[in-house]
Image (cartoon, grey):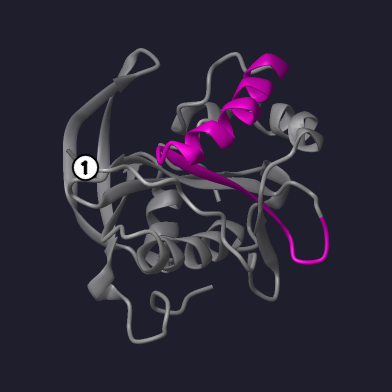
Amino acid sequence: MVRVPPLPLPDPELRDDAVRLRAPSPDDLPAMVAACQDPLIQRFTFVPVPYGEEDARAFLLGREAAREAGEALALAISPVDGDELLGMVGVQRFAWEHRTCDVGYWVAPAARGRGVAVRALRLLAPWVLRETGVRRIALAADVENRASQRLAERAGFVREGTVRSAIEVKGRRWTEALYSLVTEDLGAGEGPAEAAGVAEPARPGA
């Protein structure tokens, strides 16, 4: 039987010259609720619809237990010099026997167009591959979500193909473009290929 380890929090905090990834807090609740009213987030992620304070509160309350159980790690995306909630990024759906997981994200409408999600992925994904024992991170984007597919490629993920009628969520069948980042994609001491959102079918359930 595979022993499931707790997921560590990045220490030191993951950051670049524009964004930082931090633990979500109850102070984020109003911004989470506001962001998740966005039609694109509702269409292309698995957040509940309608989305209210109770949904955000349940996510925040369950976050630490999921991390301790080795099930998920969710981080808030903020400006490097502040706490404003720009979006969320996280890894989940771990298959520890295969050392794989999924990554997902969403970006608040007002924060789009700045490369926020690309930066967040380029910070989090290499750290996960180096620090948790995971060897493959999958990213699935609805085929209609062209922006998320471009974003995945800019973040260094490699497209593997299309999975037709892959899942049924929110009353429709989703055909997904599948991407991955694996340990071998990282150079010695380097992250994914350099490159600079909208939501991906995602998988942090904020």
Magenta-colored stretch includes residue 56: yes
Residue 171 x/y as whole percent: 35, 12
Q: Position of residue 78 (x, y in %)?
A: 72, 55
* Residue plotted at (16% across, 34% down): 164
Location of the N terminus (image quadrant): top left
Say which of 19 and 41 sits in front.
19
Query: Circle 1 sits on which residue?
Result: 2
185 vs 58, left or right, is left
Residue 166's place in the image compared with 98, above or below, is: above
Q: Is residue 179 left or right of residue 16?
A: left
Q: What stretch is highlighted in magenta?
A: 53-82
Which residue is found at the position 49% from the left and 39% from the top? Answer: 68
Quadrant of res 80 = bottom right
Q: Is residue 38 visible from the viewing direction of this image?
A: no
Residue 89 rendering spot, x and y as whole percentages = 54, 48
Near mark 1 (Cα within 10 A), the count class, few <14, some 14-19 or many ≥20, is few
Given residues 120 and 163, the one toward you in this image is 120
Q: Nearer the viewer, residue 104 or 151?
A: 104
Please determine whether, in this image, residue 140 is positioned above or below residue 99: above
Secondary structure type for disc 1: loop
Tag 1: amino acid: Val
The picture places residue 60, in percent across and down from the top left corner, at 65, 30
From this viewpoint, is residue 140 visible?
Answer: yes
Q: In this view, does 162 lie to the left or right of 80?
A: left
